[in-house]
Image (cartoon, grey):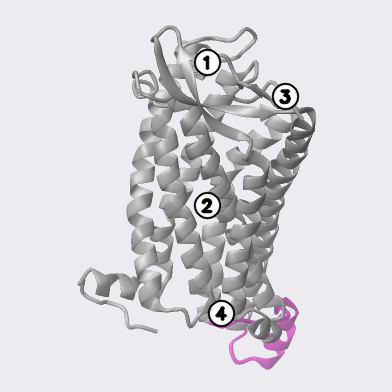
Amino acid sequence: MILNVTQPSQELENVLSSSTGGDFITGAQLYFILLTTSALTQVFNLGGVITNSINIAVFVKLGFNETSNISLLALALCDLLSTFLTIWGSLCVTPGFSDAELPFLPTEIGNLTGGGLANLVLRCTAWVTAFISFERCLCILIPLKVKKWITRKTTTVVMVAICIATIGPYIGAHWRWIFVWKFLPGRNATVLGVTVVSTPFLDLKEKIENIVLGLIQPIVAFVTVLVCTVFLVVYLRRSSQWRKSMASAGEEKAGGDNSSRFEPKQTISRKEEKLVRLVISIATIFIVCYTPNTLVFLNMAIFPSFWVFGQHKNTFLMVYTLSVMASSVSASVNIFIYYNMGTRYRNAFRLMFHLDLKDSVK
């Protein structure tokens, strides 16, 4: 079989300075947008590196007697890795760095080694968040059985399986993107870039894999988090109504019996309720920040011209960088949720940084 090695675009570095006919965003507008969003994204990423490093240290200090600590540690690891990759990917599309005469093409190399891998890790984050949300739902629906099913070993296996399920197919789908040396006549220099090995079979195979891995997989994770979050919110509202009705009834048994119709099927302890609220907060931030990324992939599937090599490449880069910035925000703010809503986390945090303890360890 003869392989035809083709270049995805004539010169990706022209994306930042050229306008495409029919595109909604001009090259000059894209330049300003990328300059602004890249700077903000880098700020959030640097914050994410710091906050997630602290999260990892705190969860290790807390230990793994509770399965939730294992999944939250996995979430922190995913967030930390995604911030590192996004720092590199954002740097490669930052005006000034991308225009510099470097020994490689920043946009091409950054798209493959930064942005592409960051999307991969983001899928891991989505599925870890989905598992955390789903686990809380099971703890409410079948609290006695879930303790036997979801153990420390089970949670660890699931976290590893999520990584394999997201990384493995990615390698199979993108192995044909290879590094090559390209000669640039304008610079009279040979630099490192990226190209794709193309055959009709591989093109069809990649289209199918992109639909399954790039569209269906992240959307299923997103919908799972959304459904589980809605369920948890509804349950907490019903539980709150029931508690208020019991409090208003006081010691009157008749009032207590009358309010029993508001009681959820399974009541949970205050400690479990705080954990549910924490999960809802994490999931809500994920939903808000992951929505732009989901919309990007949906538009890529519906409109073939909406991608980095398409007719509307400028619009794609604008929307994509905004979605990357939103993902960076999501990866950097969980520490504030843990600290404000988790007593054990807050105490471990204070001990680690030798601060005065105001709360007793529970």
Q: Residue at x 49, y 56 (%)?
A: 78
Instruction: Give how far across and how far down residue 221 sits, in percent.
Output: 67, 54
Q: Earlier in the sequence, mark 4 or mark 1?
A: 1
Q: Name the amino acid, label 3.
A: Pro
Residue located beneath label 1 in the image: 11
Q: Residues under labels 3 and 1: Cα distance?
A: 19 Å
- Contact between marks 4 and 2 (CB within 8 A): the answer is no
Q: Earlier in the sequence, mark 3 or mark 1?
A: 1
**Dot 1 surroundings within 10 Å: few (below 14), some, or many (20 or more)?**
some
Residue located beneath label 3 in the image: 304
Instruction: Note whether 121 is above or below 192 in the view shown.
Output: below
Residue located beneath label 4 in the image: 152
Instruction: Tell me where the magenta segment starts and ends, as one range.
Output: 249-269
The one nearer the camera, 193 or 55, is: 193
The one nearer the camera, 205 or 302, is: 205
- Residue 132 visible (yes or no): no
Q: Nearer the viewer, mark 2 or mark 1?
A: 1
